[in-house]
Amino acid sequence: MKKRGFTGSILYWRKGMLLALGVSALLLPARSPGEESPSEVALSPVNSIVNGIISYTRWPQLNGLPRLCIFSSATSASQLAREQNRPVFTPVIVANTDQALRENCDAVYFGHESVQQQIALREQYHGKPQLYIAEQNPDCSAGSVFCLNITDKKISFSVNLDSLSRSGVRVSPDVLMLARARKNNDE
């Protein structure tokens, strides 16, 4: 029996995956043009950004998908809670900070909560590794790690490196560079 090296194993695996993908494509039901399946409906821009941020974030000792508590005051709450084709997080809608604490979230998405409320919640989690994202924190100088800047024409985000260093999570430098590039394009 011939031994395969690591590279040979990967190539063998890729060929198997391509074959499985081809067979599954043949089994898909035919649809008329213009008919969209739920998985083909595009994510909202906010979902895309939040999915990207969370997918490039690592929590120490997290098993499974991170739980994202979404404050019901958030403009994008219903969009973020909608089921996704390839989920990156488990959404949980919360009405207040007490409920967010009970849900034991790994990440929190703030809506109209003030910077002081964001900081207070972070302190109540007592050092648990958490990611904080806010819709209504334009200067991003305190509170959340990521702050979405939502206007009629575009959505961008900024990063609070001080909050990130206190969060206990690790975020890929690629996301941080993307935030920096977007900020430079806005100026």
Image (tube, grey):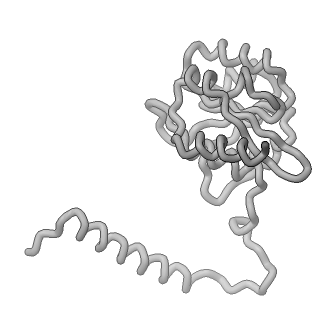
Farthest residue toward the left?
1
Residue lying at 71% horizontally and 46% vertically, measured from the top left: 182
Total number of numbered discs in the rendering: 0
Question: Which quadrant: the C terminus?
Answer: top right
Q: In this view of the protein, which residue sits in the foreground, 184 or 174?
A: 184
Residue at 52%, 79% in the rendered image? 24
Q: Position of residue 81 (x, y in %)?
A: 75, 45
On the image, the x and y values in percent for residue 114 come to: 83, 21
Would you place residue 49 above or below residue 62 in this image?
A: below
Q: Is residue 138 above or below residue 142?
A: below
182 or 47, which lies in front?
182
Residue 136 drawn above or below residue 46? above
Q: Where residue 174 appears, x then y in whole percent?
A: 54, 46
Residue 124 placement (x, y as % from top left): 66, 13
Q: Quadrant of the N terminus?
A: bottom left
Q: Is residue 27 left or right of residue 85?
A: left
Q: What is the quadrant of residue 68 in the picture?
A: top right
Q: Nearer the viewer, residue 122 or 99?
A: 122
Q: Identify the residue shown where x is 76% and y is 74%.
A: 36
